[in-house]
Image (cartoon, rainbow, N blue to C red):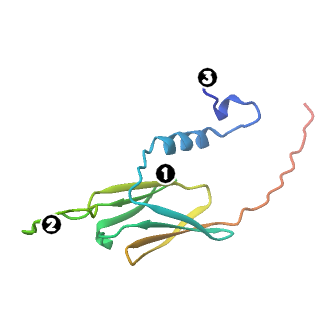
Amino acid sequence: MSKLSLGSTPYLLGFEQLERLLERNAKSGNEGYPPFNIEQTSQNSYRITLAVAGFAESDLSITVEDKQLVIRGRQSEETGDRVFLHRGIAARQFQRSFVLADGVEVGEAIMENGLLHVDLTRAEPETIVQTVKIRKG
């Protein structure tokens, strides 16, 4: 069975970048940590919420890299003399990536009660009609 690509159909022109984004997203290997929600807060805005209990604002970084929102968390190593009898609270580093469509901008990020909220907005799409003049050859 051969792989069907967007570039293999004659009616979809210029979608090579979309195909690369889909492949990159499939390979990102996002596991289940940390858990997250994505909600639509209005017709043109979204909110991504990650459960980051135990992380401080200084342990988190949010960047946009090549149309990808990347959220990373790394807790600082504790050097105290603490002895854990049971350690069930995850303290591992993570990276979550979300592919952003054209026109989607990252707004503010808010840390609240162990939840990191990242707001996104999409610009209103413009309806453009272009008339192409036909020249005599």
Residue at the disc numbered 3 = 2
Q: Residue furthest right?
A: 136
SS type, badge 3? loop
Quick one: label 3, few (<14), some, or many (20+) residues within 10 Å? few
Establish if 19 lies above or below 116. above
SS type, badge 1? loop
Q: Quadrant of the C terminus?
A: top right
Q: As shown in the figure, which amino acid type bears the numbered disc 3?
A: Ser
Percent x, y of residue 131: 87, 50
Instruction: Please give the name of the residue rendered at 36% of the width and 67% of the height, measured from the top-left corner.
Output: 52
Establish if 27 lies above or below 32. above
Asked if residue 67 lies left or right of residue 131, the reply is left
Residue 136 figure quarter: top right
Earlier-in-chain disc, 2 versus 1:
1
Earlier-in-chain disc, 3 versus 1:
3
Percent x, y of residue 84: 14, 65
Residue at the disc numbered 2 = 78
Marks 2 and 1, how far apart at CA: 34 Å
Residue at the disc numbered 1 = 66
Percent x, y of residue 122: 63, 65
Percent x, y of residue 121: 60, 68
Marks 3 and 1, how far apart at CA: 29 Å
SS type, badge 2? loop
Residue 134 numbered mark, or none: none
Earlier-in-chain disc, 2 versus 3:
3
Q: As shown in the figure, which amino acid type bears the numbered disc 1?
A: Asp
Instruction: Please give the name of the residue rendered at 72% of the width and 62% of the height, measured from the top-left corner.
Output: 125
Asked if residue 134 lies left or right of residue 96, the reply is right
Q: Give yes or no for contact between labels 3 and 1 (Cβ–Cβ under 8 Å).
A: no
